[in-house]
Image: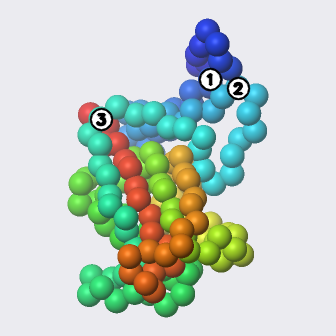
């Protein structure tokens, strides 16, 4: 299905469907002619109950921060998964992740490992994402903080 806007490019709307559910969960918004992004979506659309997280970091239930950037990303994504589950949401309900990192090079150096961790926790559903380098996070030893937005279908 394509939608043409009066003053814009054609927009391809690609439905994403959960394996165990035939209801449409989200639509990937991919403008016609744009290259397909790797590991994220340009845009997402959904209808339903909105679930948002605060800035989530890589500590456990006892507030012990994981050692190192990759371990903190693993714990952060696991924490987001737990928050989503608390709302009855699944990874395929994710529409947006905003990553805040204190060192962009640390992120870029570990892309392959981060991709493996992401897929192990959330599968191959890639929402819209943004990545921002910041001077520091509230928890001084934190290397990454991620905010998530999900929509549970009605």
Q: Which residue is mark 1?
A: 11
User: Which is nearer the eye, 103 or 49?
Assistant: 103
Q: Where, by quadrant of the figure, is residue 111 drawn? A: bottom right
Front residue of 45/6: it is 6
Residue, x 57% and y 59% (percent of image)? 131
Question: Going by the image, does 143 lie left or right of 52?
Answer: right
Residue occupying the far top of the picture:
6
Q: Residue at x 45, y 33 (%)?
A: 45
User: Helix, strand or loop at disc 3?
Assistant: strand
| Residue at 29% in and 35% down | 48
Colour treatment of the image: rainbow
Regarding mark 1 in the picture, which secondary structure is present there?
strand
Residue of label 2: 32
Q: Position of residue 116 (x, y in %)?
A: 61, 70
Mark 3 Cα shell of 10 Å, populated few (<14), some (14-19), many (≥20): few
Q: Are marks 1 and 2 in contact (CB under 8 Å)?
A: yes
Give the structural element (helix, strand or loop) at label 2: loop
């Amino acid at each position: 299905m394509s939608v043409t806007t009066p003053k814009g490019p054609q927009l391809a709307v690609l439905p994403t469907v959960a394996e165990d559910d035939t209801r449409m969960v989200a639509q990937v918004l991919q403008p016609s002619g744009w290259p397909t992004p790797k590991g994220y979506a340009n845009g997402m659309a959904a209808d339903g109950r909105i679930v948002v997280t605060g800035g989530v970091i890589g500590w456990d239930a006892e507030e012990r921060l994981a050692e190192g950037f990759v371990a903190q990303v693993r714990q952060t994504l696991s924490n987001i998964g737990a928050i989503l589950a608390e709302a009855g949401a699944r990874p395929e309900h994710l529409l947006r992740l905003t990553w805040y990192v204190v060192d962009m090079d640390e992120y870029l150096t570990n892309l392959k490992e981060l991709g493996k961790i992401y897929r192990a926790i959330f599968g191959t559903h890639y929402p819209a994402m943004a990545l921002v380098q910041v001077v520091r996070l509230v928890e001084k030893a934190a290397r990454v903080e991620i905010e998530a937005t999900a929509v549970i279908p009605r």
